[in-house]
Each structure stands twice: as C-alpha cells, then as structure tokens.
Amino acid sequence: MTWQLYLALSFVMFMEYAIWGAWFPVLAARLFGPLKMSGKQTGLIYATLPLACIVFPLLAGWLADKHLNTEWILIVAHFAGAVLLFLAARKTTFKGLFVVMLLYSVFYAATLPLVNSMMFHHLAKVCADEAAVDAASGKIFLWAPVAWALVGYFLTGWRWKFKTGEQGRDCLYFAAALSLIMAVGCIFMPETPPPPPSPDVVQAPIAETIKMLGDINFLVFVVVSMIIAGLMQFYFQGTARFMQDIGVKNRNVPASMAIAQAVQAIATFFLLGVCLNSLGYKWTLAVGAGCWLLLYVIYIGTKERRLIVPAQALHGLAYVFFIIGGQIYAKSVASKDILSTMQALMFAATTGLGLLLGTQFAGVVMDKFKKEEKFQWRQIFMVPAGVALVCILVFVLLFKARTS
C-alpha cells in the first residue's frame, strides 16, 4: 500500500467518525439541560440516525455496488449534511430539531458503509491475501477512534476558552464544519467505481446479502450484534449526564468520554489483529461484548469519579473487538460483488435497527427510574448489564466461526 493511498483512506475514515463524534456523545446533555427535553424526547432525537440506518445504508450500498462511484455519493451526502447540521444547531423545539436531525441522518447514514467498502475495495487490490487486508484495515480503522478522541478534546478546549458548554449547540456547528471539509476532501479521493458484474451472482446485491441470513450461524451473529449495539444507547444517552451527576464538570465531559476513543485507537492498532489471529472471530467478539458488560457493572457499583472516568476505556475496547471485529468478520464472509451491501447490512442491523430499538428502550428505562428530576443510575444501568450477560451467553453457546 502506497503512502498516498494510506493517507486518502485514513482521511475519509478520520473525517467520517469525527463528524459523528463531534455531536453524538454530548448532544444529550443539551437536550436534557437547556432544551428541557424528556428521556423519551431525547430517545427520539437519538433515534433519527438509527431509523435512517435501517434503509439508507442498504440503498447507498446498492448504488455503490451497481451504479455510482462511491466517492460521489460521499460528496453529495456530506455537503447536504453540513447544511442540515447548521440548521439543527439553531433549533430549540423538539419538533423542529427532530425533523432536521431526521433529514440529516438520511444523508449521513448513507455514507457509513461506504467508507468501509471503499477501504476494503482498494486494499483488496494491493494486498496479497485476506489476512493482509485485515492487518492493513486495522491501521486505517484506528483513525475512527482517533477522530472521536480529538474532537472530544477539541470541544472541551473550545468550551473552556469560549464558555459555550452551557447551551451545548457548539457540537452541532462543529460537526457541520467537519461535514463540509469531508465533502470537499472526497473530491480528491481515488476513483471507486462499482465492481464489474459477476456471472456467479444472479440476484441483486441486496437480495444476495439478505439470503445469507438463512445461515443460522450468520443469523446469530447479526441478531446478537443488533442487540449489543442497541445497548450502547445506555452509554451514549446516559454517560454524559451520569458524569455530571457524580461531579464531573460539563466542560470536562467530552474529554472524559474521549478516553474511550484514545484507548480504541491504541487497541485497533496493537491488539485487534493479534486477537483475531489468536482468539478468532468468536472469542474476539465475546471479549468485546464483555467489556461493555464490565463497564455497566462499574457504573452500577460505584459513583467514584476516579473509577468512572478511567472506565471509559472499556467502551473503547468493546467497540474495537465487537463492532470493528464484526465488520471485518462480515467482510470475510462476503464476496466482492456484495462488499458494499454487506457492510450496509451490518450498519442497518446495528446502527440502524439495533440503535433504534436501543434509543427507545433506554429512553423508557431512564424515564421510569427518574424521580424528582433525578436519575436513579444504579437501577438504570442494571438493565443493559442483564441484557448484555444473556447475549454473551447465547453468542458463546451458538456462534461458530473459523479462527481468523
């Protein structure tokens, strides 16, 4: 792999997740705080991206596999996203913000699988075998958590300097600027056309991909991935407010949560390939899910800041071993003719249906365990901990995969 290709692929990976990381972890504090929204309303705002991810990644994957160059889909979607994020920052009512964020999510959701498929497309052309692609992809995937960490620290510094943390709309303006940079940068990306038609694939890419769910082993993988991903909403919707309630200052929350992304970057570079080769897909994924379980157990057991803040590292490890590991596993079982659509299926199942159900579930649970405007965090986090434990047991018992 040339350094030019590495920089190009790293750029799109970095920017894709910088945009997401600029607003997603901290917007809930604005919704619960200055905008005075309920847990249900906050859940609905956070549901806009999962709702869009059910359909639009598959549509974008189909377009990229059949009709349009991937880079042009990214250009149009991110330019539209920049405009919509700017508008979202100016909305103060639930209805107005929900509509704009839903429109934004339609465009952003379409881009999520394409960054992965673009990377796998170009790495397949320059790497000797699948193991080499897995190793090289880890060095590019690491820029996703680096992006989340850096935008978290930047936003913290911005709030220290300009005192914008109380209103919290700065995260949306920041994401809008990053979206514009991404759109411009994609103009200079290497050409990524649809693959030539294969005589072995007689169905449309979406139908061919969905047909794989007939394999019980793959179905278990997708269903467990969907549920575990949904439980992340307890982390995203709860952690920022939980930290504030135990005494972490609002302006320090983004940097505290960004510990997860710093650890994620290190683990992606140094540990992911090692775990996939030594543990195989099954146990790498199980370890990842176990890290989330342990994080929720810590949330249940203590309110000590000296434990809660470092425990954010567990979210980073979980994301590497379960989410990224799952994306690599999905790539390994997909043919090149459905590469974009397979990545889209995983985003539709996890970031789509999984997070959609998770937002609603987390919102209902948070409202149920809220008394006199105070959240009962121990009871709240016992729910995802229990569900995660059941999912891990089911996965370990039923899932079978090759070792790497």
Image (cartoon, helix red, strand yellow):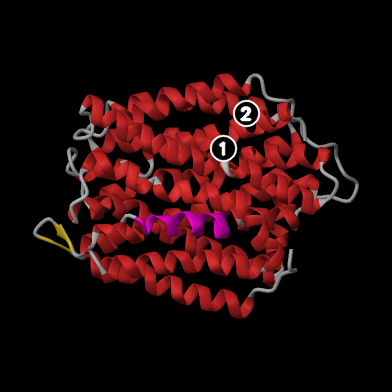
Q: Are marks 2 and 1 in contact (CB under 8 Å)?
A: yes
Q: Tell me residue 145's x, y (percent).
A: 50, 44
Residue 30 visible to the viewer? no
- Residue 261 versus residue 2 in the image, above or below: below
Q: Tell me residue 194's x, y (percent).
A: 77, 34
The prevailing secondary structure element of the residues shown in magenta is helix
- Mark before the other along the chain sequence, 2 or 1: 2
State the residue in front, 175 or 212.
Answer: 175
State the residue in front, 224 or 301.
Answer: 301
Is 60 magenta? The answer is: no
- The numbered disc on residue 221 is none
- The numbered disc on residue 110 is 1
Could you tell whether 11 is left or right of 276 in the image?
left
| Amino acid of disc 1 | Ala
Is 316 magenta? The answer is: yes
**Extreme residue in the left direction:** 372
- Residue 228 versus residue 59 in the image, above or below: below
What segment carries the magenta color? 310-323
Image quadrant containing the C terminus:
bottom right
Q: Residue at x 42, y 61 (%)?
A: 231
SS of the residue at dot 1? helix
Image quadrant containing the N terminus:
top right
Label 2, on which residue?
73
Q: Residue at x 61, y 48 (%)?
A: 269
